[in-house]
Amino acid sequence: MNGKRVLLGVTGSIAAYKAVELARELSRRGVVVDVVMTEAATKFVCPLTFEALLGRPVTTGLFDGGPVGAIPHISLAGAVDAVLVAPASADAIARIAHGLADDILCCTVLACTRPLIVAPAMDEDMYANAATQANIAVLKQRGAVVVGPASGVLASGRTGAGRMSNTHDIVEHTLKVLGRQGDLAGRKIVVTAGGTQEPIDPVRCIANRSSGKMGYALAEACRDRGADVVLVSAPTSLRPPAGVEFVQVLTAQEMYEATKTAVRDTAALIMAAAVADYRPTQTADEKIKKGPGTLVLSLERTIDILGSLRGDFVRVGFAAESNDLEEHARHKLEEKELDLIAANDITSGDSGFGSDDNRVTIIDRKGSVERLPLLSKRDVADHIVNRVVKLLG
Ligand code: CTP
């Protein structure tokens, strides 16, 4: 996202305090954030808060300072890649829907040809009111992305729909919009993640220690470059990324079926999931009771998903190894006839299972070996996606 610029329009709602975190999170993701505040917004949060956090001036009026001759709303509108109005009060939504031009935010939105994202925040009756609904419908009809609102406790103490969506969701939807023109725009990418669980009885299963973080980072990386992502995920404790099609599965067999359906019109399949190679031959209907002796579980092979799903798409596998990393990875690449394999050493303490970082070696069909240093899983994902983009031409 480095270099992408977002205009964050903050309007008069108690949720304005959450816009501070939103601005910071976008900035943390490499987005340059220019803040415009309506007069009402400044009653809730002070411009200095944004200025101190972002190190950039905040615009609050149509006639704010700047270079002589500069027209703030025109120069801002021309400089940004997207406009995000968060929180968007009922009043702000109405003004934007009606094309009013009497404050800095409305004028900038009116002058801007870039995508508009709106995160409504208001009391539930205001949100449910036919006028607000009609205004939101107008914005959607014009192509705006409306994120939320969420349901929960409102500033009035009532519970209902009207809370501004959480920061994570708004950030992710914004990144997706920013990636629309990316190098994967219009392409479908299927990513698998997490560790499958093979039931032994109603309470026990064979599982593994995959956190799913690598696969989720890959899904986000593809989404942020414009891809239509399907994320087929075995259980994890992670929040599904916004802006991707999310398919929850449990077992290797379920993952196979979901992935087989998903790859029909895909450009690439990236199998980051840790799929169980064996499952119990039988799943007990009742909980197995302990006894004095040894318990022997009979296991059978699961289907090799990546090995069996072939077609006119790029296929990327993962190899988690404890020894002879590159040799094992190369063997898997050849055996499954993959385009790329990303291998990681699970014995190194600073990367791999559960960690936020990974040290990965990428090997391709031609035998080229790219040994990456220890990086965040998101950075590793970006490297892998770069290679996929190259393969896709
Ligand atoms: N994989 C798969 N289906 C399986 C098992 C693994 O699609 N039933 C995928 C994984 O998602 C990964 C790659 O295949 O991309 C891993 O290759 P594999 O040789 O199966 O590795 P392991 O399961 O770790 O097996 P081994 O015990 O041979 O190391």
Image (cartoon, helix red, strand yellow):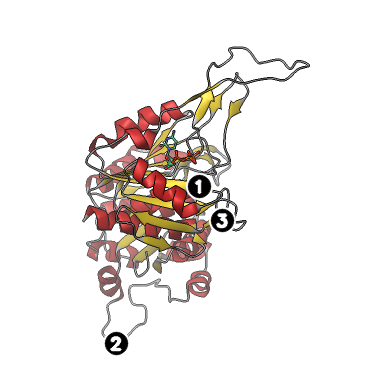
Residue toward you, 331 or 42: 331
CA gap, disc 1 and disc 2: 60 Å
Closer to the chain start, of discs 1 and 2, is: 2
Q: Is residue 380 above or below residue 155?
A: below
Of circles 1 and 2, the one toward us is 1
Residue 164 visible somewhere in the drawing:
no
Pick whichever of labels 2 and 3 is earlier in the sequence: 2
State the residue in front, 128 or 153: 153
List x then y, in percent, for residue 30: 42, 66
Report the front residue among 231 and 22: 231
Identify residue type, mark 1: Ala
Which residue sits at x=49%, y=53%?
Answer: 325
Instruction: Measuring from the top left, give residue 186's x and y in whole percent.
Output: 22, 49
Quadrant of res 183: bottom left
Element at badge 3? loop
Q: In the rendered image, which residue does mark 2 sit on?
A: 68
Does 25 appear above or below 201? below
Q: Is residue 100 left or right of residue 273?
A: left
**Circle 3: residue type:** Ser
Q: Which mark is residue 351?
A: 3
Amino acid type of the residue that numbered disc 2 sits on in the rendered structure: Val
**Which residue is outermost to the top?**
285
* Residue labelled 2 has its Cβ within 8 Å of some atom of ligand 1: no
Q: Is residue 283 shown to the viewer in this render?
A: yes
Residue beneath label 1, please?
Answer: 320
